[in-house]
Amino acid sequence: MVITRFAPSPTGYLHIGGLRTALYSYLWSKKNSGKFLLRIEDTDLKRNSKEAAFAIENAFAWTNLSHDGKIIYQSTRFDIYKSYVKQLLDEGKAYKCYMTKEELDSLRTFQMANKIRPHYDGRYRDFKGVPPKGVEPVIRIKAPLDGEISFVDGIKGEVHFNVKDMLDDFIIARSDGTPTYNFVVTIDDALMNITDVIRGDDHLSNTPKQIVIYEALGFEIPKFYHVPMILNNQGKKLSKRDGALDVMEYKNEGYLPEALLNFLVRLGWSHGDQEIFSLEEMIEFFDPSDINKSASAYNEEKLMWINSQYIKKLSSERLIKELEYFDVSIENFPKKEELIDVLRDRAKTIKELAVMVSNIVNEPTNYDEKACKKFIKGDALKNLAAFRETLEAHGECKSSEEFEILAKKFLEERGLKLKDLAQPIRIAMVGSAVSPSVFEVLNIVGYKNVIARIEKLLKHKGEENE
Ligand code: GLU
């Protein structure tokens, strides 16, 4: 059974890099009919907040990636961690260190001055004497003193760490008794039977420490996959300047969660040259050992393209629901399906779609000046007025074809071109010269409203000319 987890620390929002590792972990567990757990790593009471945890859960819920079981909060598990600290102390695998801050500082200064890697020198490792008074000890684990710690990373291959270069007897519990980061991650991964740890490669240097803890406690070591970072176009760490980092900003910009996931799965992983993957396909094809060994470059245009592909295919029902987030409700609009279908190919984001939809659904409140200058001149208003009369004489038009036949006849009789009428009509309908096929728009706006909107523009222009 494959059990994976996503373990964000609630120090801020859910980051897209985090969401990508969550997705990879999710896919890998689902592919193996396993489990995917969500664990909030909130033991750092100074840096973590409830609001941040809530924001992460909220963003995660938006992505629709379901987790198995309840969300696990590390802050509710302090007793468990304490019992393992005690176990290691009892077994002599960890010890109390009474070094004061001043002593630590002076050790560090000495090491730096002598070009030695700053590290704890093990002075309390075998201490048998009387502990100094007034110092609350920290608990340190007995790490190996030399040799190598190695493991096979599912992405990077064999990884070796020379103990002398990077390890010391690190702290597993602070003087106030709270356990440290690497300690709780290890305990939880072990107790939750995590078989495959998929995480960002910024955690690579934590892994040897965690292996020391696994070994001290006799836990089975999971398989690790360290995923290379997402970089910007300049090959630097992705920052806010390169685009949004907060998953919820993508929602606010009108991206669909499935499009964002599709974008993220491709950012660092591929399957032939396929670009669009349903979640089922991702589950079918994904294998973390195919994740790229090198960092991947963030590309917002690609995200937008993927989003537009999803908008083209999504059910109108769903798109109508999505529009509500942008305060556009067309649930009761008579031609809502036609409206969505005529616009879905033109919008790259739901935010754009919302603007286009509301431009058609609502009577214009103002008219684009440039478009008016360009198209409302000569006989434009006269033609519009005549077309309104033609419409009235004809009676209700019930389809875009009917509007088209009527308009073509009207133009023919007057020796006019389509453009003589189409742009002024667009301006009357949506306030600008940009809209989908004019006859589709007329049909969607509906006969009565078409007449009303023409009248409104005529009145507006008439008043302007007085
Ligand atoms: N809590 C860590 C973070 O948010 C992740 C720990 C892990 O995946 O092992 O970066």
Image (tube, rainbow, N blue to C red):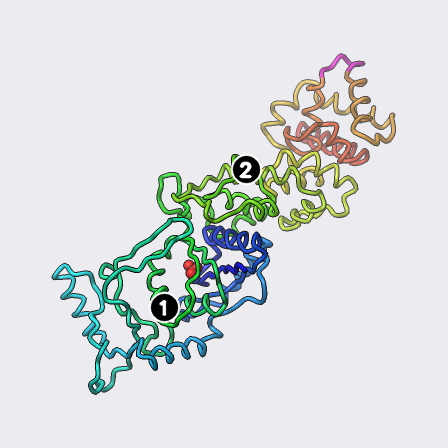
**Judging from the image, what secondary structure is the residue with disc 2 in?**
loop
Q: Quadrant of ligand 1?
A: bottom left
Q: Residue at x 67, y 24 (%)?
A: 423
Q: Position of residue 148 (x, y in %)?
A: 27, 59
Q: Is residue 147 magenta?
A: no
- Image-based side of 279 in relation to 172, left or right: right
Quarter of the view holding residue 254: top right
Q: Position of residue 340 (x, y in %)?
A: 70, 39
Between the residue at mark 2 and the residue at mark 1, the CA separation in whole angstroms equals 42 Å
- Image-based side of 245 in relation to 373, left or right: left
- For label 1, the residue is 215
Quarter of the view holding residue 135: bottom left
Closer to the camera, 112 or 198? Answer: 198
- For label 2, the residue is 275
The amino acid on which the numbered mark 2 sits, given as a three-letter code, is Glu
The amino acid on which the numbered mark 1 sits, given as a three-letter code, is Glu
- Image-based side of 37 in relation to 364, left or right: left
Determine whether 242 is above or below 426 in the image.
Answer: below
